[in-house]
């Protein structure tokens, strides 16, 4: 097991790219404000930003000059200590509105008549209304896609963190499923996975989807108090939280005595995932990967069920590019993506595997402990993947 001290878990943004973004877009400033963009741009993970929406925070990147951080005063000491940005401004919660400090900062920077980018995918309507009324000479455009594009190409430090998390979560799942048996309730098995994820280094559980038995006909599901019976398919999609980062991992198991159809559907799905990962490399459009996966699934006589078969992964769970139709983003070296095909058997029970891969100069590198074994694993038995 890797210790948390082995790797620097603090977000380390590509500062030169961020600072150059306004000029590259021909605008006067870019404001990063959604939780993921703020975390990346500031280099600080502020836990409450994900849960207390009123505590807005911003990083302002002017085309000329140095960036400014604006945040709630309660988080000021943490941000001041950890950020790479020198100018940190705070507001007093319930006394001052965060948008008012943003407006005064824009004026201080001489940008009250400027063209300013901001995260339209997160900006509250009331905040936007206040901005436009206070700064009638300014114009605002959406720069969420451009910031997402910067985050999509990872540094070596980011890749090391994501690989660590993927391997720790994979180890946790192997331990939990090896100690589970038919007769355990769905909740006992799911809680065992969650406990192992935390014992393997996670701060908490990001989510656990555990559709089992007849609930396996649903894409997502919650564990119940029902005992798992022999011959059932157990499918789960889980993730842990590690500071600003997370993990995202899925596997399919049998509770014992799998049928010939169950073994066949599962083996075909594992083969499809391996073939998809095998064709991924720099220069390929994300939508081509989706099309390839759909083709291989239908060629094997299996239903193709998902609107996407994977996604970029980083500080945000679903980052761009998504492996979906119409996604024209080209894969680049340094991108990290989850590849997660899904299908079902003749009873409508779904099967799912998911692994994290890095796009290298010539292809891919698997960041989990390895792809799932081709033989359908059975709970209570040791496996290697």
Image (tube, rainbow, N blue to C red):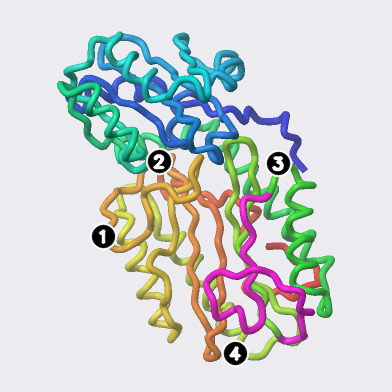
Q: Is residue 221 magenta?
A: yes
Contact check, label 4 and label 3, Cβ < 8 Å: no
Residue 118 lies, in percent from the top left, at 30, 32
Of circles 1 and 3, the one toward us is: 3
Of circles 4 and 1, the one toward us is: 1
Q: Quadrant of residue 45?
A: top right
Residue at which label 1 appears: 326
Contact check, label 2 and label 1, Cβ < 8 Å: no
Q: CA distance from mark 4 to mark 3?
A: 39 Å
**Magenta range:** 205-231
Of circles 4 and 3, the one toward us is: 3
Q: Is residue 242 left or right of residue 2?
A: left
Q: Majority secondary structure of the magenta segment?
A: loop
Residue at 35% x, 24% y is: 18
Residue at 45% x, 30% y is: 56
Which of the two labelled residues, at mark 4 and mark 1, occupies the earlier sequence position? 4
């Amino acid at each position: 097991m890797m210790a948390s001290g082995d790797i620097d878990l603090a977000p380390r943004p590509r500062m030169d790219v961020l600072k150059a973004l306004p000029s590259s877009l021909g605008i006067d400033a870019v404001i990063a404000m959604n939780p993921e963009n703020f975390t990346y741009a500031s280099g600080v993970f502020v836990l409450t930003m994900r849960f207390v929406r009123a505590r807005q925070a911003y990083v302002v990147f002017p085309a000329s000059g140095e960036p400014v951080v604006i945040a709630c005063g309660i988080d000021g000491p943490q941000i001041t200590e950890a950020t790479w940005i020198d100018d940190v401004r705070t507001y007093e919660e319930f006394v001052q509105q965060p948008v008012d400090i943003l407006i005064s900062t824009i004026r201080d920077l001489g940008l009250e008549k400027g063209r300013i980018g901001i995260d339209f995918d997160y900006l509250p309507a009331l905040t936007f209304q206040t901005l436009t009324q206070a700064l009638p000479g300014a114009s605002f455009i959406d720069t969420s896609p451009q910031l997402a594009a910067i985050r999509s190409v990872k540094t070596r430090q980011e890749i090391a963190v994501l690989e660590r998390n993927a391997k720790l979560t994979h180890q946790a799942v192997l331990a939990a499923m090896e100690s589970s048996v038919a007769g355990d309730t769905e909740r006992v098995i799911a809680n065992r996975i969650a406990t192992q994820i935390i014992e393997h280094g996670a701060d908490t559980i990001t989510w656990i989807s555990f559709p089992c038995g007849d609930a396996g006909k649903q894409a997502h599901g919650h564990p119940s108090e029902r005992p798992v019976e022999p011959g059932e398919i157990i499918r789960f999609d889980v993730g842990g939280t590690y500071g600003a980062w997370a993990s995202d991992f899925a596997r399919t198991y049998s509770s014992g005595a799998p049928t010939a159809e169950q073994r066949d559907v599962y083996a075909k799905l594992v083969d499809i995932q391996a073939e998809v990962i095998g064709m991924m490399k720099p220069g390929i459009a994300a939508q081509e990967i989706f099309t390839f996966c759909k083709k291989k699934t239908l060629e094997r006589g299996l239903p193709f069920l998902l609107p996407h078969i994977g996604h970029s992964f980083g500080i945000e769970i679903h980052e761009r590019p998504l492996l979906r139709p119409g996604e024209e983003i080209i894969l680049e070296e340094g991108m990290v993506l989850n590849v997660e095909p899904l299908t079902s058997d003749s009873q409508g029970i779904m099967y799912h595997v998911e692994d994290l891969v890095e796009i290298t100069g010539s292809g891919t590198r698997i960041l989990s402990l390895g792809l799932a074994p081709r033989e359908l694993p059975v709970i209570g038995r040791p496996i290697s993947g």
